[in-house]
Image: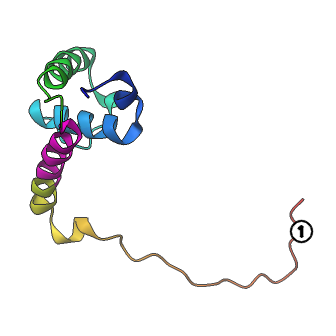
């Protein structure tokens, strides 16, 4: 069964497609659409339509996953070690001197 509108409505598939299109346009893969210019959005739309048309009827989800995973593996390989981890967060408990009531 070929790619359908219901596939595009799936947020996970749509996010993967956007990531693939960002990469194809030399835009950082995790860039949100809201951060693109109008011209970039139009170009992305055109590229995405072609990409979807060129997907095989069978195994198209596997093809999207393969392309997405390849892009993300490159993305993570290029990250610096300090960008991969959440910085330490202060988890100290501060005692309050009087009781606080939240209404």
Q: Is residue 33 above or below residue 92?
A: above
Dividing the picture into quarters, in which one does residue 99 lie? bottom right
- Residue 24 % position (x, y): 10, 32
Q: Is residue 60 above or below residue 88?
A: above
- Residue 36 % position (x, y): 27, 26
Indicate yes or no whether the magenta region holds residue 76. Answer: no
Q: Nearer the viewer, residue 100 or 8?
A: 8
Which quarter of the figure is the C terminus placed in?
bottom right
Residue at 22% x, 70% y: name it.
82
- Residue 57 % position (x, y): 18, 28
Q: Residues within 10 Å of mark 1 (few under 14, many from 20)?
A: few
Dividing the picture into quarters, in which one does residue 10 lie? top left
Look at the image and tell me whether residue 26 can be seen.
Answer: no
Dividing the picture into quarters, in which one does residue 12 lie? top left
Q: Is residue 53 above or below residue 65?
A: above
Magenta residues, dominant SS class: helix
- Residue 33 % position (x, y): 32, 29
Q: Is residue 18 above or below residue 67?
A: above
Look at the image and tell me whether residue 68 can be seen.
Answer: yes
Residue at 67% x, 83% y: name it.
94
Q: Tell me: 32 left or right of 2.
A: right
Label 1, secondary structure: give it: loop
Q: Tell me: 11 left or right of 78.
A: right
Residue at the spot of label 1: 101
Number of numbered tags placed on the structure image: 1
Q: Tell me: 58 left or right of 100.
A: left
Which quarter of the figure is the N terminus placed in?
top left
Indicate yes or no whether the magenta region holds residue 65. Answer: yes
In the rendered structure, which segment of residues is drawn in magenta? 59-72
Residue at 86% x, 63% y: name it.
102
């Amino acid at each position: 069964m070929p790619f359908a509108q219901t596939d595009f409505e799936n947020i996970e598939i749509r996010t993967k497609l956007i990531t693939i299109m960002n990469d194809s346009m030399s835009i950082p893969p995790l860039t949100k659409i809201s951060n693109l210019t109008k011209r970039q959005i139009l170009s992305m739309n055109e590229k995405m339509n072609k990409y979807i048309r060129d997907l095989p009827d069978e195994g198209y989800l596997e093809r999207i996953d393969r392309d997405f995973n390849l892009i993300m593996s490159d993305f993570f390989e290029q990250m610096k070690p300090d960008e991969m981890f959440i910085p330490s967060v202060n988890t100290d408990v501060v005692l309050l001197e009087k009781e606080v009531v939240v209404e």
